[in-house]
Amino acid sequence: MLAMLLGAAIPVHVASAASGAVPTADAAQIARGAYLAKAADCAGCHTAAPHAKPAGGALIPGVPFAGGLGMASPFGTIYSSNITPDPQAGIGRYNYDDFARALRDGVAPRGKRLYPAMPYPSFARIDDDDMHALYAYFMHGVTPVATPATPTRLPFPFNQRWALMFWDWAFAPTGPFKADARHDAQWNRGAYLVQSLGHCGACHTPRGPAYEERGYTEASLLYLTGGTNDHWFAPNLSGDEGSGLGRISASDVAAFLKHGHGGGLVTFGSMVQVVEDSTQYLNDADLIAIASYLKNLPPRAPNAHFDPRSSAAQQSAQALATGDVERPGAGIYATYCARCHQSTGAGVPQKYPRLAGNPAVLAPQTVSLVRLLVEGGASPNTVDGPDSRKMPPFADKLNNSEIAHVLTFVRSAWGNAAEPVTAHDVSAVRSAIHK
Ligand code: HEC
Ligand code: HEC
Ligand code: HEC
Protein backbone atom coordinates (compact mmCIF):
# COMPACT_ATOMS: atom_id res chain seq x y z
CA MET A 1 0.00 0.00 0.00
CA LEU A 2 2.73 2.39 1.06
CA ALA A 3 4.87 1.24 -1.86
CA MET A 4 1.94 1.88 -4.19
CA LEU A 5 1.41 5.38 -2.92
CA LEU A 6 5.09 6.15 -3.02
CA GLY A 7 5.36 4.53 -6.45
CA ALA A 8 2.83 7.03 -7.76
CA ALA A 9 5.01 9.88 -6.60
CA ILE A 10 8.41 8.88 -7.86
CA PRO A 11 7.84 9.75 -11.57
CA VAL A 12 7.33 13.41 -10.60
CA HIS A 13 10.84 13.45 -9.23
CA VAL A 14 12.31 11.38 -12.01
CA ALA A 15 11.00 13.95 -14.49
CA SER A 16 12.45 16.88 -12.59
CA ALA A 17 15.88 15.38 -11.93
CA ALA A 18 18.36 15.97 -14.76
CA SER A 19 20.23 12.71 -14.18
CA GLY A 20 17.00 10.72 -14.16
CA ALA A 21 17.79 9.55 -10.64
CA VAL A 22 15.35 10.18 -7.82
CA PRO A 23 16.79 12.86 -5.52
CA THR A 24 17.27 10.79 -2.39
CA ALA A 25 16.49 13.59 0.04
CA ASP A 26 13.02 13.98 -1.46
CA ALA A 27 12.22 10.28 -1.57
CA ALA A 28 13.37 9.97 2.03
CA GLN A 29 11.32 13.00 3.04
CA ILE A 30 8.21 11.62 1.34
CA ALA A 31 8.69 8.26 3.07
CA ARG A 32 9.06 10.04 6.41
CA GLY A 33 5.90 12.02 5.65
CA ALA A 34 4.07 8.74 4.98
CA TYR A 35 5.21 7.43 8.39
CA LEU A 36 4.10 10.64 10.12
CA ALA A 37 0.73 10.47 8.35
CA LYS A 38 0.31 7.00 9.90
CA ALA A 39 1.31 8.34 13.32
CA ALA A 40 -1.34 11.07 12.94
CA ASP A 41 -3.92 8.68 11.43
CA CYS A 42 -4.80 11.14 8.65
CA ALA A 43 -6.26 8.25 6.61
CA GLY A 44 -8.42 7.06 9.51
CA CYS A 45 -10.50 10.25 9.39
CA HIS A 46 -10.03 11.21 5.74
CA THR A 47 -11.22 7.92 4.19
CA ALA A 48 -14.96 7.27 3.81
CA ALA A 49 -16.47 4.18 5.46
CA PRO A 50 -17.03 1.19 3.13
CA HIS A 51 -20.42 1.47 1.44
CA ALA A 52 -22.79 -0.97 -0.26
CA LYS A 53 -23.30 -0.97 -4.05
CA PRO A 54 -26.91 -0.16 -5.01
CA ALA A 55 -27.10 -3.67 -6.53
CA GLY A 56 -25.83 -5.29 -3.32
CA GLY A 57 -22.76 -7.54 -3.11
CA ALA A 58 -19.44 -6.83 -1.41
CA LEU A 59 -18.86 -3.47 0.29
CA ILE A 60 -16.76 -0.93 -1.63
CA PRO A 61 -13.96 0.47 0.55
CA GLY A 62 -13.50 4.26 0.76
CA VAL A 63 -10.67 5.79 -1.28
CA PRO A 64 -7.67 6.69 0.95
CA PHE A 65 -7.53 10.43 1.79
CA ALA A 66 -10.51 11.28 -0.49
CA GLY A 67 -12.58 12.31 2.56
CA GLY A 68 -16.31 11.93 3.16
CA LEU A 69 -16.19 10.07 6.48
CA GLY A 70 -19.08 11.36 8.57
CA MET A 71 -18.20 12.18 12.18
CA ALA A 72 -20.85 12.66 14.83
CA SER A 73 -20.38 15.85 16.87
CA PRO A 74 -22.74 17.54 19.30
CA PHE A 75 -23.50 20.00 16.46
CA GLY A 76 -24.37 17.44 13.77
CA THR A 77 -22.45 15.28 11.30
CA ILE A 78 -19.17 16.74 10.04
CA TYR A 79 -17.65 15.21 6.87
CA SER A 80 -13.89 15.07 6.44
CA SER A 81 -12.31 16.83 3.43
CA ASN A 82 -10.63 15.35 0.37
CA ILE A 83 -6.91 15.85 1.19
CA THR A 84 -5.48 14.25 -1.95
CA PRO A 85 -3.44 16.61 -4.17
CA ASP A 86 -6.26 17.09 -6.71
CA PRO A 87 -6.31 20.85 -7.52
CA GLN A 88 -10.14 21.15 -7.45
CA ALA A 89 -11.54 18.47 -5.17
CA GLY A 90 -8.52 18.22 -2.88
CA ILE A 91 -5.64 20.29 -1.53
CA GLY A 92 -3.50 20.36 -4.69
CA ARG A 93 -3.44 24.17 -4.72
CA TYR A 94 -2.25 24.47 -1.12
CA ASN A 95 1.24 25.91 -0.72
CA TYR A 96 3.28 24.89 2.34
CA ASP A 97 1.99 27.80 4.42
CA ASP A 98 -1.65 26.96 3.60
CA PHE A 99 -1.01 23.38 4.69
CA ALA A 100 0.73 24.30 7.95
CA ARG A 101 -2.00 26.84 8.78
CA ALA A 102 -4.83 24.34 8.15
CA LEU A 103 -3.12 21.73 10.34
CA ARG A 104 -1.98 24.02 13.16
CA ASP A 105 -4.60 26.77 13.28
CA GLY A 106 -7.61 25.05 11.69
CA VAL A 107 -7.86 27.73 9.00
CA ALA A 108 -8.02 26.58 5.35
CA PRO A 109 -7.29 28.95 2.40
CA ARG A 110 -9.66 31.93 2.01
CA GLY A 111 -10.12 32.00 5.76
CA LYS A 112 -12.36 28.91 5.98
CA ARG A 113 -12.36 27.94 9.65
CA LEU A 114 -12.34 24.19 10.28
CA TYR A 115 -14.44 22.46 12.90
CA PRO A 116 -12.39 21.01 15.74
CA ALA A 117 -13.39 17.49 14.58
CA MET A 118 -10.08 18.01 12.75
CA PRO A 119 -7.63 17.81 15.68
CA TYR A 120 -5.75 21.05 14.92
CA PRO A 121 -5.37 21.97 18.59
CA SER A 122 -3.06 18.91 18.83
CA PHE A 123 -1.50 19.31 15.39
CA ALA A 124 -0.47 22.85 16.45
CA ARG A 125 2.43 21.09 18.18
CA ILE A 126 3.80 19.36 15.06
CA ASP A 127 7.33 20.68 14.49
CA ASP A 128 8.50 22.32 11.23
CA ASP A 129 10.57 19.36 10.00
CA ASP A 130 7.65 16.99 10.38
CA MET A 131 5.25 19.50 8.81
CA HIS A 132 7.52 19.79 5.73
CA ALA A 133 7.72 15.99 5.44
CA LEU A 134 3.92 15.67 5.70
CA TYR A 135 3.49 18.35 3.02
CA ALA A 136 5.96 16.58 0.70
CA TYR A 137 4.05 13.32 1.18
CA PHE A 138 0.61 14.81 0.55
CA MET A 139 1.78 16.68 -2.57
CA HIS A 140 3.92 13.92 -4.09
CA GLY A 141 3.16 10.63 -2.33
CA VAL A 142 -0.64 10.53 -2.50
CA THR A 143 -2.68 9.78 -5.64
CA PRO A 144 -5.00 12.69 -6.56
CA VAL A 145 -8.73 11.90 -6.48
CA ALA A 146 -11.04 14.26 -8.41
CA THR A 147 -14.24 13.34 -6.58
CA PRO A 148 -15.30 16.02 -4.07
CA ALA A 149 -16.04 14.83 -0.52
CA THR A 150 -19.61 14.97 0.83
CA PRO A 151 -20.14 18.57 2.02
CA THR A 152 -20.86 19.27 5.68
CA ARG A 153 -24.26 20.90 6.27
CA LEU A 154 -24.81 21.78 9.88
CA PRO A 155 -27.92 23.60 11.08
CA PHE A 156 -27.77 27.29 11.99
CA PRO A 157 -25.92 28.63 14.01
CA PHE A 158 -23.29 25.88 13.72
CA ASN A 159 -22.95 26.43 9.96
CA GLN A 160 -21.43 29.87 10.67
CA ARG A 161 -17.78 28.89 10.36
CA TRP A 162 -16.52 32.40 11.12
CA ALA A 163 -17.87 32.03 14.66
CA LEU A 164 -15.29 29.29 15.27
CA MET A 165 -12.86 32.17 15.60
CA PHE A 166 -14.19 32.71 19.12
CA TRP A 167 -13.82 29.03 19.93
CA ASP A 168 -10.21 29.17 18.71
CA TRP A 169 -9.48 32.26 20.81
CA ALA A 170 -10.95 30.64 23.89
CA PHE A 171 -9.66 27.10 23.61
CA ALA A 172 -7.09 26.29 20.95
CA PRO A 173 -3.60 26.23 22.42
CA THR A 174 -0.97 28.22 20.60
CA GLY A 175 2.64 27.54 19.97
CA PRO A 176 4.76 24.51 19.20
CA PHE A 177 5.75 21.59 21.40
CA LYS A 178 8.39 22.58 23.94
CA ALA A 179 10.82 19.94 25.13
CA ASP A 180 10.99 19.59 28.92
CA ALA A 181 14.60 19.61 30.10
CA ARG A 182 13.66 17.83 33.35
CA HIS A 183 13.00 14.67 31.33
CA ASP A 184 15.16 12.54 29.02
CA ALA A 185 14.98 12.33 25.22
CA GLN A 186 12.75 9.24 25.26
CA TRP A 187 10.15 10.91 27.50
CA ASN A 188 10.21 14.00 25.29
CA ARG A 189 9.79 11.95 22.11
CA GLY A 190 6.82 10.18 23.69
CA ALA A 191 5.28 13.44 24.89
CA TYR A 192 5.68 14.91 21.39
CA LEU A 193 4.03 11.93 19.66
CA VAL A 194 1.15 11.69 22.15
CA GLN A 195 0.41 15.43 22.24
CA SER A 196 0.93 16.34 18.58
CA LEU A 197 0.62 13.72 15.82
CA GLY A 198 -1.01 11.01 17.96
CA HIS A 199 -3.73 13.41 19.24
CA CYS A 200 -4.47 10.77 21.91
CA GLY A 201 -6.21 13.42 24.03
CA ALA A 202 -8.92 13.87 21.38
CA CYS A 203 -10.47 10.70 22.83
CA HIS A 204 -8.70 10.17 26.16
CA THR A 205 -9.12 13.69 27.63
CA PRO A 206 -12.56 14.70 28.93
CA ARG A 207 -14.25 17.52 27.00
CA GLY A 208 -15.87 20.63 28.40
CA PRO A 209 -19.22 22.23 27.56
CA ALA A 210 -18.00 23.72 24.26
CA TYR A 211 -16.51 20.35 23.17
CA GLU A 212 -13.03 21.63 24.08
CA GLU A 213 -10.47 19.17 25.47
CA ARG A 214 -9.80 19.91 29.15
CA GLY A 215 -6.05 20.21 28.67
CA TYR A 216 -3.39 19.41 26.08
CA THR A 217 -0.37 18.52 28.23
CA GLU A 218 0.36 16.72 31.48
CA ALA A 219 0.39 20.15 33.17
CA SER A 220 -3.44 20.00 33.12
CA LEU A 221 -4.93 17.82 35.84
CA LEU A 222 -7.57 16.28 33.55
CA TYR A 223 -5.24 15.53 30.62
CA LEU A 224 -5.70 11.89 29.45
CA THR A 225 -7.89 11.02 32.44
CA GLY A 226 -10.62 9.54 30.22
CA GLY A 227 -13.24 10.85 27.82
CA THR A 228 -16.37 9.73 25.97
CA ASN A 229 -16.77 10.24 22.23
CA ASP A 230 -19.32 8.61 19.98
CA HIS A 231 -20.51 6.40 22.89
CA TRP A 232 -17.08 4.90 23.55
CA PHE A 233 -15.25 5.72 26.78
CA ALA A 234 -11.49 6.02 26.26
CA PRO A 235 -9.97 5.13 29.65
CA ASN A 236 -7.70 6.98 32.01
CA LEU A 237 -4.09 6.67 30.78
CA SER A 238 -2.55 8.12 33.95
CA GLY A 239 -0.89 5.98 36.62
CA ASP A 240 -4.05 5.24 38.63
CA GLU A 241 -3.86 1.66 39.95
CA GLY A 242 -7.60 1.04 39.49
CA SER A 243 -8.89 2.16 36.11
CA GLY A 244 -5.62 3.70 34.81
CA LEU A 245 -2.36 2.19 33.54
CA GLY A 246 -0.78 1.90 37.02
CA ARG A 247 -0.64 -1.92 36.93
CA ILE A 248 0.22 -2.26 33.20
CA SER A 249 3.94 -2.33 32.30
CA ALA A 250 5.47 -0.05 29.65
CA SER A 251 6.26 -3.03 27.43
CA ASP A 252 2.64 -4.26 27.67
CA VAL A 253 1.40 -0.77 26.70
CA ALA A 254 3.75 -0.81 23.68
CA ALA A 255 2.54 -4.32 22.69
CA PHE A 256 -1.08 -3.17 23.03
CA LEU A 257 -0.39 -0.31 20.61
CA LYS A 258 1.54 -2.58 18.20
CA HIS A 259 -0.81 -5.59 18.04
CA GLY A 260 -3.88 -4.69 20.09
CA HIS A 261 -2.87 -7.26 22.74
CA GLY A 262 -0.80 -6.40 25.82
CA GLY A 263 -0.74 -7.62 29.42
CA GLY A 264 -3.98 -9.54 28.83
CA LEU A 265 -5.83 -6.45 27.55
CA VAL A 266 -7.32 -6.52 24.06
CA THR A 267 -8.22 -3.39 22.09
CA PHE A 268 -11.92 -2.81 21.48
CA GLY A 269 -14.31 -0.04 20.42
CA SER A 270 -12.91 3.05 18.69
CA MET A 271 -9.34 2.10 19.74
CA VAL A 272 -9.41 -0.81 17.25
CA GLN A 273 -9.17 1.59 14.32
CA VAL A 274 -6.41 3.57 16.02
CA VAL A 275 -4.31 0.39 16.28
CA GLU A 276 -5.22 -0.87 12.80
CA ASP A 277 -4.67 2.43 10.93
CA SER A 278 -2.00 4.08 13.02
CA THR A 279 -0.10 2.71 16.02
CA GLN A 280 0.70 -0.73 14.54
CA TYR A 281 2.90 1.06 11.97
CA LEU A 282 5.02 2.91 14.55
CA ASN A 283 8.56 1.66 15.05
CA ASP A 284 9.55 0.07 18.36
CA ALA A 285 11.51 3.10 19.55
CA ASP A 286 8.47 5.35 19.10
CA LEU A 287 6.12 2.84 20.75
CA ILE A 288 8.39 2.52 23.78
CA ALA A 289 8.71 6.32 23.93
CA ILE A 290 4.91 6.67 24.00
CA ALA A 291 4.59 3.94 26.62
CA SER A 292 7.24 5.45 28.87
CA TYR A 293 5.65 8.91 28.61
CA LEU A 294 2.26 7.44 29.61
CA LYS A 295 3.82 5.38 32.42
CA ASN A 296 5.36 8.58 33.79
CA LEU A 297 2.01 10.35 34.11
CA PRO A 298 1.22 10.70 37.83
CA PRO A 299 -1.88 8.86 39.06
CA ARG A 300 -4.94 11.06 38.56
CA ALA A 301 -8.75 10.73 38.66
CA PRO A 302 -8.59 7.53 40.77
CA ASN A 303 -11.45 5.08 40.33
CA ALA A 304 -12.08 1.51 41.55
CA HIS A 305 -9.61 -1.09 42.85
CA PHE A 306 -8.24 -4.50 42.05
CA ASP A 307 -7.23 -6.81 44.89
CA PRO A 308 -7.14 -10.50 43.95
CA ARG A 309 -6.49 -11.47 47.59
CA SER A 310 -9.62 -9.81 49.01
CA SER A 311 -12.45 -11.80 50.59
CA ALA A 312 -14.75 -10.52 47.83
CA ALA A 313 -12.43 -12.24 45.36
CA GLN A 314 -12.89 -15.56 47.21
CA GLN A 315 -16.67 -15.09 47.29
CA SER A 316 -16.90 -14.54 43.53
CA ALA A 317 -14.93 -17.75 42.89
CA GLN A 318 -17.47 -19.53 45.07
CA ALA A 319 -20.47 -17.87 43.38
CA LEU A 320 -19.21 -19.17 40.03
CA ALA A 321 -18.80 -22.66 41.43
CA THR A 322 -22.28 -22.81 42.98
CA GLY A 323 -24.34 -20.53 40.69
CA ASP A 324 -25.26 -18.44 43.76
CA VAL A 325 -28.76 -16.91 43.42
CA GLU A 326 -27.69 -13.82 45.38
CA ARG A 327 -25.50 -12.96 42.40
CA PRO A 328 -27.56 -13.48 39.29
CA GLY A 329 -24.69 -12.11 37.18
CA ALA A 330 -22.52 -15.09 38.14
CA GLY A 331 -24.88 -17.55 36.45
CA ILE A 332 -25.09 -15.40 33.31
CA TYR A 333 -21.30 -15.15 33.24
CA ALA A 334 -20.88 -18.92 33.56
CA THR A 335 -23.38 -19.55 30.75
CA TYR A 336 -22.43 -16.87 28.24
CA CYS A 337 -18.94 -15.54 28.95
CA ALA A 338 -16.72 -18.06 30.73
CA ARG A 339 -15.97 -20.14 27.64
CA CYS A 340 -13.84 -17.30 26.30
CA HIS A 341 -12.97 -15.17 29.33
CA GLN A 342 -12.60 -18.24 31.64
CA SER A 343 -14.23 -18.74 35.02
CA THR A 344 -11.11 -17.25 36.62
CA GLY A 345 -11.58 -14.07 34.54
CA ALA A 346 -8.03 -14.56 33.26
CA GLY A 347 -8.92 -14.76 29.54
CA VAL A 348 -6.66 -16.55 27.04
CA PRO A 349 -3.38 -14.87 26.03
CA GLN A 350 -3.35 -13.46 22.47
CA LYS A 351 -7.02 -14.44 22.07
CA TYR A 352 -9.48 -13.28 24.71
CA PRO A 353 -8.90 -10.43 27.19
CA ARG A 354 -8.68 -10.97 30.90
CA LEU A 355 -11.50 -9.27 32.80
CA ALA A 356 -9.85 -9.65 36.23
CA GLY A 357 -7.93 -6.46 36.95
CA ASN A 358 -8.64 -5.06 33.46
CA PRO A 359 -8.59 -1.25 33.83
CA ALA A 360 -11.18 -0.77 31.05
CA VAL A 361 -13.56 -3.02 33.02
CA LEU A 362 -13.00 -0.86 36.14
CA ALA A 363 -13.73 2.45 34.35
CA PRO A 364 -15.93 5.09 36.02
CA GLN A 365 -18.09 5.27 32.88
CA THR A 366 -19.62 2.05 31.63
CA VAL A 367 -20.84 3.18 28.22
CA SER A 368 -18.14 1.18 26.35
CA LEU A 369 -18.85 -2.00 28.31
CA VAL A 370 -22.58 -1.80 27.59
CA ARG A 371 -22.00 -0.91 23.95
CA LEU A 372 -19.58 -3.84 23.47
CA LEU A 373 -22.01 -6.32 25.04
CA VAL A 374 -24.89 -5.06 22.92
CA GLU A 375 -23.03 -4.82 19.59
CA GLY A 376 -20.21 -7.31 20.02
CA GLY A 377 -16.82 -6.49 18.54
CA ALA A 378 -13.70 -7.81 16.87
CA SER A 379 -10.12 -7.46 18.05
CA PRO A 380 -7.78 -5.65 15.64
CA ASN A 381 -6.41 -7.13 12.48
CA THR A 382 -2.75 -6.16 12.35
CA VAL A 383 0.07 -7.01 9.95
CA ASP A 384 1.92 -9.30 12.35
CA GLY A 385 -0.25 -9.57 15.45
CA PRO A 386 -2.57 -12.41 16.49
CA ASP A 387 -5.67 -13.19 14.38
CA SER A 388 -8.73 -11.02 14.91
CA ARG A 389 -11.29 -12.71 17.21
CA LYS A 390 -14.94 -11.88 17.64
CA MET A 391 -16.88 -11.05 20.76
CA PRO A 392 -20.51 -11.99 19.96
CA PRO A 393 -23.33 -9.41 20.33
CA PHE A 394 -25.74 -10.11 23.21
CA ALA A 395 -28.54 -7.71 22.18
CA ASP A 396 -30.89 -10.60 21.36
CA LYS A 397 -29.75 -12.96 24.12
CA LEU A 398 -29.74 -10.78 27.24
CA ASN A 399 -32.24 -8.12 28.33
CA ASN A 400 -31.24 -4.82 29.95
CA SER A 401 -31.30 -6.10 33.49
CA GLU A 402 -29.33 -9.25 32.56
CA ILE A 403 -26.67 -7.11 30.87
CA ALA A 404 -26.57 -4.94 34.00
CA HIS A 405 -26.25 -8.03 36.23
CA VAL A 406 -23.43 -9.64 34.26
CA LEU A 407 -21.47 -6.38 34.04
CA THR A 408 -22.01 -5.74 37.75
CA PHE A 409 -20.68 -9.24 38.40
CA VAL A 410 -17.65 -8.74 36.14
CA ARG A 411 -16.90 -5.41 37.88
CA SER A 412 -17.00 -7.03 41.33
CA ALA A 413 -15.51 -10.52 40.74
CA TRP A 414 -11.95 -11.87 41.14
CA GLY A 415 -10.90 -8.81 43.21
CA ASN A 416 -12.36 -6.20 40.84
CA ALA A 417 -14.11 -3.51 42.86
CA ALA A 418 -16.04 -0.96 40.76
CA GLU A 419 -19.53 0.54 40.97
CA PRO A 420 -22.48 -1.62 39.85
CA VAL A 421 -24.21 -1.12 36.48
CA THR A 422 -27.98 -0.55 36.48
CA ALA A 423 -30.63 -1.56 33.93
CA HIS A 424 -31.21 2.17 33.49
CA ASP A 425 -27.53 2.66 32.50
CA VAL A 426 -27.98 -0.08 29.91
CA SER A 427 -31.19 1.32 28.45
CA ALA A 428 -29.69 4.83 28.23
CA VAL A 429 -26.79 3.54 26.10
CA ARG A 430 -29.07 1.35 23.97
CA SER A 431 -31.38 4.21 23.11
CA ALA A 432 -28.40 6.48 22.30
CA ILE A 433 -26.95 3.92 19.86
CA HIS A 434 -30.43 2.84 18.61
CA LYS A 435 -29.81 -0.85 19.33
C1 HEC B 1 -9.93 12.88 14.05
C2 HEC B 1 -10.18 13.05 12.65
C3 HEC B 1 -9.13 13.72 11.77
C4 HEC B 1 -7.79 13.45 11.69
C5 HEC B 1 -6.99 12.45 12.50
C6 HEC B 1 -7.26 14.30 10.66
N1 HEC B 1 -8.25 15.08 10.13
FE1 HEC B 1 -8.03 16.53 8.71
N2 HEC B 1 -10.00 17.01 8.88
C7 HEC B 1 -10.93 16.31 9.61
C8 HEC B 1 -12.25 16.88 9.39
C9 HEC B 1 -13.55 16.40 10.00
C10 HEC B 1 -12.07 17.93 8.47
C11 HEC B 1 -13.14 18.86 7.91
C12 HEC B 1 -13.38 19.96 8.91
C13 HEC B 1 -14.37 20.99 8.44
O1 HEC B 1 -15.05 20.77 7.41
O2 HEC B 1 -14.43 22.04 9.07
C14 HEC B 1 -10.63 18.00 8.18
C15 HEC B 1 -10.05 18.95 7.34
C16 HEC B 1 -8.72 18.92 6.94
C17 HEC B 1 -8.12 19.86 6.03
C18 HEC B 1 -8.81 21.06 5.39
C19 HEC B 1 -9.16 20.74 3.97
C20 HEC B 1 -10.12 21.76 3.36
O3 HEC B 1 -9.65 22.64 2.66
O4 HEC B 1 -11.34 21.60 3.62
C21 HEC B 1 -6.81 19.47 5.84
C22 HEC B 1 -5.77 20.12 4.97
C23 HEC B 1 -6.62 18.29 6.65
N3 HEC B 1 -7.78 18.00 7.32
C24 HEC B 1 -5.44 17.58 6.69
C25 HEC B 1 -5.19 16.53 7.59
C26 HEC B 1 -3.92 15.87 7.72
C27 HEC B 1 -2.71 16.14 6.85
C28 HEC B 1 -4.06 14.96 8.72
C29 HEC B 1 -2.98 14.08 9.34
C30 HEC B 1 -1.75 14.79 9.73
C31 HEC B 1 -5.42 15.06 9.22
N4 HEC B 1 -6.07 16.01 8.50
C32 HEC B 1 -5.94 14.30 10.25
C33 HEC B 1 -10.66 15.28 10.50
C34 HEC B 1 -9.42 14.74 10.77
C1 HEC C 1 -10.73 7.51 18.39
C2 HEC C 1 -10.56 7.57 19.81
C3 HEC C 1 -9.21 7.18 20.37
C4 HEC C 1 -7.97 7.70 20.07
C5 HEC C 1 -7.61 8.78 19.05
C6 HEC C 1 -7.04 7.02 20.93
N1 HEC C 1 -7.68 6.12 21.73
FE1 HEC C 1 -6.80 4.85 23.04
N2 HEC C 1 -8.61 4.04 23.50
C7 HEC C 1 -9.82 4.45 22.99
C8 HEC C 1 -10.88 3.64 23.55
C9 HEC C 1 -12.37 3.76 23.25
C10 HEC C 1 -10.27 2.72 24.42
C11 HEC C 1 -10.98 1.65 25.28
C12 HEC C 1 -11.01 0.32 24.59
C13 HEC C 1 -9.74 -0.45 24.75
O1 HEC C 1 -9.25 -0.63 25.88
O2 HEC C 1 -9.19 -0.85 23.72
C14 HEC C 1 -8.83 2.99 24.36
C15 HEC C 1 -7.86 2.29 25.07
C16 HEC C 1 -6.52 2.61 25.11
C17 HEC C 1 -5.54 1.95 25.94
C18 HEC C 1 -5.84 0.80 26.92
C19 HEC C 1 -6.31 1.40 28.21
C20 HEC C 1 -6.97 0.45 29.14
O3 HEC C 1 -7.08 0.82 30.31
O4 HEC C 1 -7.42 -0.63 28.73
C21 HEC C 1 -4.32 2.55 25.70
C22 HEC C 1 -2.99 2.21 26.34
C23 HEC C 1 -4.55 3.58 24.72
N3 HEC C 1 -5.89 3.59 24.37
C24 HEC C 1 -3.58 4.43 24.24
C25 HEC C 1 -3.79 5.39 23.26
C26 HEC C 1 -2.73 6.20 22.69
C27 HEC C 1 -1.28 6.18 23.10
C28 HEC C 1 -3.33 7.00 21.75
C29 HEC C 1 -2.67 8.00 20.83
C30 HEC C 1 -1.60 7.47 20.01
C31 HEC C 1 -4.75 6.67 21.74
N4 HEC C 1 -5.00 5.69 22.66
C32 HEC C 1 -5.67 7.28 20.90
C33 HEC C 1 -10.03 5.46 22.06
C34 HEC C 1 -9.01 6.19 21.43
C1 HEC D 1 -16.55 -16.14 21.68
C2 HEC D 1 -15.72 -15.57 22.71
C3 HEC D 1 -16.33 -14.53 23.64
C4 HEC D 1 -17.47 -14.62 24.42
C5 HEC D 1 -18.46 -15.77 24.52
C6 HEC D 1 -17.51 -13.38 25.18
N1 HEC D 1 -16.46 -12.56 24.84
FE1 HEC D 1 -16.01 -10.79 25.68
N2 HEC D 1 -14.48 -10.55 24.37
C7 HEC D 1 -14.12 -11.46 23.39
C8 HEC D 1 -13.17 -10.83 22.51
C9 HEC D 1 -12.53 -11.45 21.27
C10 HEC D 1 -12.97 -9.53 22.99
C11 HEC D 1 -12.16 -8.41 22.35
C12 HEC D 1 -13.24 -7.66 21.55
C13 HEC D 1 -12.77 -6.55 20.66
O1 HEC D 1 -11.57 -6.36 20.50
O2 HEC D 1 -13.67 -5.85 20.11
C14 HEC D 1 -13.79 -9.40 24.18
C15 HEC D 1 -13.82 -8.26 24.98
C16 HEC D 1 -14.56 -8.14 26.14
C17 HEC D 1 -14.48 -7.03 27.06
C18 HEC D 1 -13.52 -5.84 26.94
C19 HEC D 1 -12.21 -6.14 27.62
C20 HEC D 1 -11.00 -5.90 26.77
O3 HEC D 1 -9.91 -5.62 27.33
O4 HEC D 1 -11.06 -6.04 25.52
C21 HEC D 1 -15.41 -7.25 28.04
C22 HEC D 1 -15.72 -6.36 29.23
C23 HEC D 1 -16.06 -8.50 27.72
N3 HEC D 1 -15.51 -9.01 26.57
C24 HEC D 1 -17.08 -9.06 28.47
C25 HEC D 1 -17.79 -10.20 28.09
C26 HEC D 1 -18.96 -10.68 28.76
C27 HEC D 1 -19.57 -10.04 30.01
C28 HEC D 1 -19.39 -11.78 28.09
C29 HEC D 1 -20.61 -12.63 28.36
C30 HEC D 1 -21.90 -11.94 28.41
C31 HEC D 1 -18.45 -12.01 26.99
N4 HEC D 1 -17.52 -11.02 27.02
C32 HEC D 1 -18.50 -13.08 26.11
C33 HEC D 1 -14.60 -12.75 23.26
C34 HEC D 1 -15.72 -13.23 23.89
Image (cartoon, helix red, strand yellow):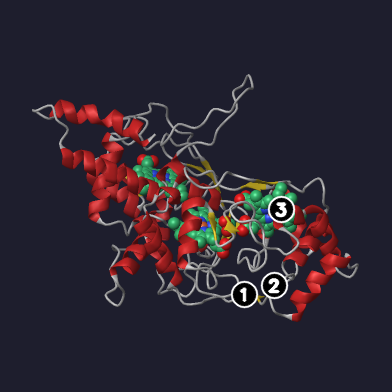
For marks 2 and 1, give the CA distance: 8 Å
| Residue at mark 2 | 418
Secondary element under disc 2, as helix, strand or loop, is loop
For marks 3 and 2, give the CA distance: 22 Å
* Front residue of 110 and 118: 118
Q: Residue at x 60, y 52 (%)?
A: 268
Query: Disc 1, disc 3: CB below 8 Å?
Result: no
Secondary element under disc 3, as helix, strand or loop, is helix
Q: 10 Å neighbourhood of mark 2: few (<14), some, or many (≥20)?
A: many
381 over 242 or under it: above or below: above
Name the amino acid type tagged 2.
Ala
Q: Is residue 177 visible?
A: yes
Is label 3's Cβ within 8 Å of ligand 3? yes
Quarter of the figure that contains the N terminus:
top left
Secondary element under disc 1, as helix, strand or loop, is loop
**Disc number at residue 150?**
none
| Residue at mark 3 | 340
Q: Earlier in the sequence, mark 3 or mark 2?
A: 3
Q: Residue at x 77, y 66 (%)?
A: 409
49 left or right, relative to 194 = right
Q: Residue furthest right?
A: 325
Q: Name the spot of residue 295 as percent of width and height, x first.
A: 45, 70
285 over 184 or under it: above or below: above
Q: 10 Å neighbourhood of mark 1: few (<14), some, or many (≥20)?
A: some
Q: Residue at x 88, y 64 (%)?
A: 323
Q: Residue furthest left?
A: 18
Q: Earlier in the sequence, mark 1 or mark 3?
A: 1
